[in-house]
Image: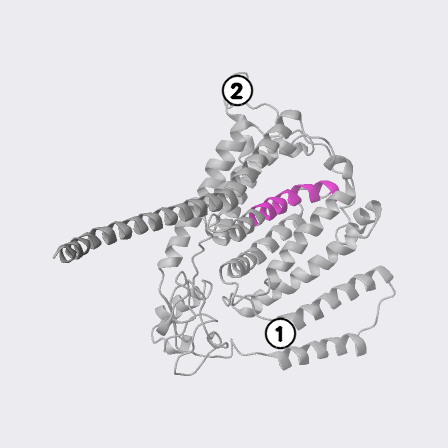
């Protein structure tokens, strides 16, 4: 039986988890028709035997029963401690767990179904919890907000020690006889593989080489521009352009594009585990459970119309703002770079970013079928904005430090160039092309009229001569 991803047309056989929705009445432009109706031209074809095992069935009553038993045990069999702070922490954690149990079993599915839809529902609910936590921090005073983090980790809530960034930028230091390349070795820390892995995953989210390179290069320009505000933006030139852009980011983007090429060419044929006869096939099927159910190739086409251009510019700006929030939040909340909360935030964005980008692409590419902005994309945008507001409230002095004059000139020039190109491409160019087309049509009409009159006069001359001859006779 043939079956495409969630929007695909269900086949004649039994329907499984991925054919819960019927095909749309009329596919939008760019979507397939006929046998593949409901599947975009950029979307891979999927074959699925429709197996619906215990792993894929809903377990709402089971989760409700286990949750009720756990709460009953705490209520009836466990003595409540007399520690108010401990009970408060425990109550908050229990409330979050109950909400996560509800969301994992009852929330609406997103565009991804591998390794399991419940996995992505879990991260959707974590997004809600994180956004509520950020709003709570936003409504506190600066002192109370920083001290509140002590409830999470007693080591937090203290000012960060000043560190020296940048420093000696010589690639080869002749004064150091023991190790003249010590500046390079000092930069090769745990953040190098983190940069590579981060950009590899970002490439899988964005699925476009040009957009990834623009974000990578623009962030380095932002670090140059804001190093007077955050000291850790002050890096050596070769750290910016060689280690970051070319090696870590560039290599991560390259590997990500190779993976995208493999995913776009991969055959998506799914069978139930117990329908596979060999153990090797079963192990391969288990491994492929952690790969996408199907694949959609992103074609952003930013210059095709104004809506897509503004959408792509918005995506780039939100990406850059989320990157800056990572550094500014650590600075204003007094959080060391190596703290586990910083790592958890990055893990969180890795899991929600891919879903958000797919929902944004569906919203831009298929407005007929996706009239509402995706739920995960909405939450990611709200989280990014709330993080920025926290930075603004907690340290307005740092953010209001004026840019150096030459930096401000560069950003003004870049903004003017982008606005000028936008006006020319989507307004003046269309007006010019429309004027040329109207002028061409008028010229063609005038030439056609002249040609018709000329042919008419030539055809009328013999008739006049014949009438003159008859008159003479």
Q: Residue at x 56, y 34 (%)?
A: 414
Dot 1 falls on a residue whose secondary structure is helix
Depth check, mark 2 against mark 1: the one in front is: 1
Residue 338 lies, with reference to residue 74, above or below; the image says: above
Q: In the rendered image, which quarter is residue 59 located in?
A: bottom right
Q: Position of residue 213 (x, y in %)?
A: 48, 41
Q: Nearer the viewer, residue 338 or 143?
A: 143
Q: Give me the C-alpha separation between circle 2 and circle 1.
A: 60 Å
User: Furthest residue to the top?
Assistant: 175
333 displayed left or right of 274: right
Q: Secondary structure at mark 2?
A: loop
Residue contact between numbered discs 2 and 1, judged by CB atoms under 8 Å: no
Residue identifier under label 2: 173
Q: Is residue 328 visible?
A: yes
Mark 2 surroundings within 10 Å by alpha-carbon count, few (fewer than 14), some (14 through 19), many (20 or more): some
Asked whether residue 197 is drawn in magenta, I would say no
The residue to which callout 1 is attached is 105
What label sits on residue 453 in the rendered view? Answer: none
State which quarter of the image contains the C terminus.
Answer: bottom left
* Residue 372 percent across, percent down from the top left: 59, 65
Q: What span is in magenta? A: 315-334
Q: Earlier in the sequence, mark 2 or mark 1?
A: 1
Dominant secondary structure, magenta: helix
Query: Is residue 119 placed above or below 428 in the rendered structure?
Result: below
Looking at this view, name the residue that lies furthest to the front: 473
Residue at figure coordinates x 53%, y 47% from the top left = 198
Q: Nearer the viewer, residue 134 or 402?
A: 402
**Coordinates of residue 259 in the picture (x, y in percent):** 41, 53
């Amino acid at each position: 039986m043939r079956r495409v991803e969630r929007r695909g047309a269900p086949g004649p056989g039994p329907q499984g988890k991925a054919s819960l929705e019927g095909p749309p009445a009329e596919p939008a432009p760019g979507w397939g028709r006929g046998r593949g109706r409901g599947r975009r031209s950029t979307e891979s074809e999927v074959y699925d035997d429709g197996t619906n095992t215990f792993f894929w069935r809903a377990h709402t009553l089971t989760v409700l029963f286990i949750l009720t038993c756990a709460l009953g045990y705490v209520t009836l069999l466990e003595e409540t401690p007399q520690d108010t702070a401990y009970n408060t922490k425990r109550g908050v954690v229990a409330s979050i767990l109950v909400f996560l149990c509800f969301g994992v079993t009852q929330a609406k599915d997103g565009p991804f179904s591998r390794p399991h839809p419940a996995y992505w529902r879990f991260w959707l609910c974590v997004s809600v919890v994180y956004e509520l936590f950020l709003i709570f921090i936003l409504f506190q005073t600066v002192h109370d907000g920083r001290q509140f983090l002590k409830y999470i980790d007693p080591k937090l809530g203290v000012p960060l020690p000043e560190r020296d960034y940048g420093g000696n930028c010589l690639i080869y230091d002749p004064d150091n006889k023991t190790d003249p390349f010590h500046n390079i070795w000092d930069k090769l820390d745990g953040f190098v593989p983190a940069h590579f892995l981060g950009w590899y995953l970002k490439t899988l989210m964005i699925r476009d080489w040009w957009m990834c390179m623009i974000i990578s290069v623009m962030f380095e320009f932002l670090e140059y521009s804001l190093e007077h505000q955050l000291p850790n933006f002050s890096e050596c030139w070769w750290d910016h352009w060689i280690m970051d852009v070319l090696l870590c980011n560039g290599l991560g983007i390259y590997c990500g594009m190779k993976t995208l090429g493999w995913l776009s060419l991969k055959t998506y044929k799914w069978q139930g585990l117990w329908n596979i006869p060999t153990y090797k096939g079963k192990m391969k099927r288990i491994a492929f459970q952690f790969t996408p159910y199907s694949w959609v190739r992103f074609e952003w086409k930013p210059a095709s119309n104004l809506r897509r251009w503004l959408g792509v510019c918005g995506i780039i700006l939100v990406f850059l703002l989320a990157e800056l929030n990572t550094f500014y939040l650590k600075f204003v909340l007094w959080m060391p770079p190596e703290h586990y909360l910083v790592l958890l935030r990055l893990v969180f964005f890795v899991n929600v970013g891919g879903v958000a980008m797919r929902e944004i692409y569906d919203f831009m590419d298929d407005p007929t079928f996706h009239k509402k902005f995706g739920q995960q994309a909405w939450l990611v945008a709200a989280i990014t904005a709330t993080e920025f507001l926290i930075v603004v409230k907690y340290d307005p002095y740092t953010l209001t430090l004026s840019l150096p004059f030459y930096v401000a000139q560069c950003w003004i020039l870049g903004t003017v160039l982008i606005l000028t190109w936008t006006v020319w491409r989507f307004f003046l160019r269309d007006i010019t092309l429309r004027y040329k087309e109207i002028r061409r049509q008028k010229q063609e009409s005038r030439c056609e009229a002249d040609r018709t009159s000329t042919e008419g006069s030539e055809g009328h001359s013999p008739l006049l001569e014949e009438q003159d001859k008859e008159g003479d006779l």
